[in-house]
Amino acid sequence: METLTLRPDGSLRLPKDVRDRLGDTGEWVVFVRKDTIILKRLAPAKLSRMAERLPADGPSLDEIAEDVRRLRRARRGGRG
């Protein structure tokens, strides 16, 4: 068990081992019940949703590679 401190701007800094386990990206639902906070990961973006965000002239190979890496990390739960 570790202690977190609520910062004046309302943010919490997660311990490194927790950040490593959760991954560096993703969308989360937050449930608050009394003094308990629960984070639940939303499903990673589908490739079709990623395609909708693309500019009309198309992405570079580097941008495509980064999106694929991000999606794979999200599907593995942020590990690796």
Image (cartoon, rainbow, N blue to C red):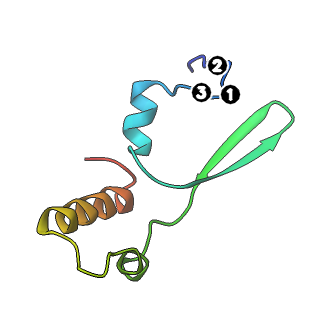
| Nearer to us in this view, 69 or 16 | 69
Q: What separation in Å lies between label 2 and label 3 (alpha carbons)?
A: 6 Å
Q: What residue type is disc 1 on?
A: Gly
Instruction: Kindly give the residue lying farthest to the left in the view shown.
Output: 61
Query: Quarter-wise, where is residue 71 in the image?
Result: bottom left
Residue at numbered disc 2: 7
In the image, residue 21 sits, relative to residue 55, either above or below, namely above
Instruction: Kindly give the residue lying farthest to the front in the view shown.
Output: 57
Along the horizontal axis of the image, is 32 left or right of 9?
right
Q: Find residue 49 and report its horizontal and vertical position in percent.
A: 43, 78
Q: What separation in Å lies between label 1 and label 2 (alpha carbons)?
A: 5 Å
Residue drawn 40% across the image and 29% down it: 17
Q: Find residue 32 and report its horizontal and vertical position in percent.
A: 79, 42
Q: What separation in Å lies between label 1 and label 3 (alpha carbons)?
A: 7 Å
Q: Total of numbered circles in the picture?
A: 3
Q: What residue type is disc 3 on?
A: Leu
Where the N terminus falls, by quadrant? top right
Along the horizontal axis of the image, is 69 left or right of 15?
left
Instruction: Kindly give the residue lying farthest to the right in the view shown.
Output: 34
Q: What residue type is disc 2 on?
A: Arg
Tag 2 near tag 3, CB within 8 Å: yes
Q: Residues within 10 Å of mark 1 (few under 14, many from 20)?
A: few
Task: Give the secondary structure at mark 2.
Answer: loop
In the image, residue 12 sits, relative to residue 63, either above or below, namely above
Residue at numbered disc 1: 10
Along the horizontal axis of the image, is 30 left or right of 17?
right
Residue drawn 22% across the image and 72% down it: 59
